[in-house]
């Protein structure tokens, strides 16, 4: 087997960082070299993620100043960032400068929003803050792996978890021309989508047996979804998005509705998706409606369709932390290093979570 590619995680204490740790620790070609956390530098990783204690036995968090000590000069580096929006770009810029000094061959996959927009102005308009490293934007591209046939940049900004679920459901439909290019989306996400730090929206007594919409028609993922749908389909798309908080920990269920140009059948729509994802190992077009338990904790997505007269419905389910974040990041990193896209990602959902 070829020499392993060393992996470093920036921001390795949150839920996405934990999932990256879990996936990389079992990956046959990536070897975990360092996990960076300024606030927990020197602490055992297993004390933060007890479920990973055996996989990371004895390994400790390191500071941003020290991670490069664990990488050989002239080596290969898979750099993952699970740092927060607004902070990730500057950390990546600093890490890339260090990598250049050590003459490393490096690819980056960023799970924050910092490199999802090619334009600094577009990013700053949506997130209301200055971009941390605008000079790096030309080195990144964004999109879900299933919709990008050719990688044209050195690094990738992975779309958000809501965006991933919705793009997988919407792009083939818009691309087909069978409907108009306005979509109406309802998305329900689990509490892990709000991050590890407790807040009212994720507090168990508030979330348990409860469900509610938030930021209707004003969620910041909507412009990202519209831009990436247009990039993948070639059609400008209007996105009307109403997100919901669901009473479960993991997963996203997205329902996309659109008006057909003329009466259309379920089978015609199903054929569109089967053709679009025929070569996509992680997308299953299912009969009936997709279920979260069939994908949670895996990198798979299930898609179901329905049509009646001139209305089309497409349903998509993913795990927000895996396919929507860490798993999608590993999938991208596999491609950046010319590895089979499925490497380290074929474990199925446990089913009874």
Image (tube, grey):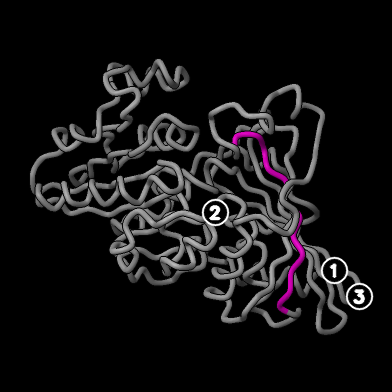
Which quadrant of the figure contains the C terminus? top right
Front residue of this view, candidates 232 and 139: 139
Distance from label 2 to label 1 (Cα)? 24 Å
| Location of mark 3 (residue) | 309
Q: Please rate how many residues cluster around mark 3, counting C-alpha atoms within 10 Å: few if below 14, some from 14 to 19, many from 20.
A: few
The segment highlighted magenta reads 181-192
| Location of mark 1 (residue) | 307
Foreground tag (2 vs 1): 1
The correct choice, above or below, for 348 with respect to 18 in the image is: below
Counting from the top left corner in percent of width and height, residue 300 is at 57, 48
Front residue of this view, candidates 178 and 218: 218
Counting from the top left corner in percent of width and height, residue 254 is at 71, 53
Distance from label 3 to label 2 (Cα)? 30 Å
Name the residue located 30 percent from the left edge and 33 percent from the top edge.
36
Q: Is residue 158 left or right of residue 4?
A: right
| Location of mark 2 (residue) | 282
Q: Is label 1 in a helix, a strand or a loop?
A: strand
* Magenta stretch secondary structure, dominant: strand
Is 190 covered by the magenta stretch? yes
Name the residue located 31 percent from the left edge and 29 percent from the top edge.
38
């Amino acid at each position: 087997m070829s020499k392993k590619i060393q992996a470093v995680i920036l921001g390795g204490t949150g839920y996405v960082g934990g999932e990256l740790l879990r996936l990389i620790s079992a990956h046959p070609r990536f070897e975990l070299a360092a996990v960076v956390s300024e606030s927990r530098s020197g602490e055992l990783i297993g004390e933060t993620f007890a479920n990973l204690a055996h996989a990371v036995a004895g390994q400790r968090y390191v500071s941003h100043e020290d991670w490069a000590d664990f990488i050989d000069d002239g080596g290969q580096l898979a750099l993952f960032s699970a740092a927060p929006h607004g902070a990730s770009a500057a950390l990546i810029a600093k890490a890339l400068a260090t990598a250049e000094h050590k003459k490393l061959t490096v690819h980056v996959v960023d799970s924050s929003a910092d490199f999802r927009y090619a334009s600094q102005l577009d990013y700053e308009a949506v997130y209301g803050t200055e971009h941390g490293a605008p000079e790096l934007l030309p080195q990144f591209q964004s999109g879900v792996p299933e919709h990008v046939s050719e990688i044209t940049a050195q690094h990738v900004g992975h779309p958000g978890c809501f965006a991933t679920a919705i793009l997988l459901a919407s792009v083939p439909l818009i691309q087909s021309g069978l409907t108009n290019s306005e979509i109406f989306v309802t998305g329900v996400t689990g509490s892990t989508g709000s991050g590890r730090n407790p807040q009212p929206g994720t507090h168990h007594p508030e979330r348990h047996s409860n469900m509610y919409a938030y930021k209707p028609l004003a969620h910041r993922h909507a412009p990202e979804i519209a831009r990436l749908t247009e990039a993948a389909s070639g059609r400008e798309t209007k996105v009307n998005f109403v997100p919901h908080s669901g009473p479960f920990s993991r997963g996203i269920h997205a329902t996309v509705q659109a008006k057909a140009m003329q009466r259309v059948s379920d089978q015609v729509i199903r054929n569109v998706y089967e053709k679009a994802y025929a070569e996509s190992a992680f997308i299953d077009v299912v009969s009936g409606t997709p279920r979260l338990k069939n994908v949670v904790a895996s990198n798979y997505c299930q898609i179901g369709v329905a049509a009646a007269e001139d209305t089309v419905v497409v349903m998509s389910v993913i795990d927000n932390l895996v396919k929507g974040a860490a798993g999608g990041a590993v999938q991208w990193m596999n491609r950046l290093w010319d590895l089979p896209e499925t490497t380290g990602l074929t474990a199925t959902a446990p089913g009874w979570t």
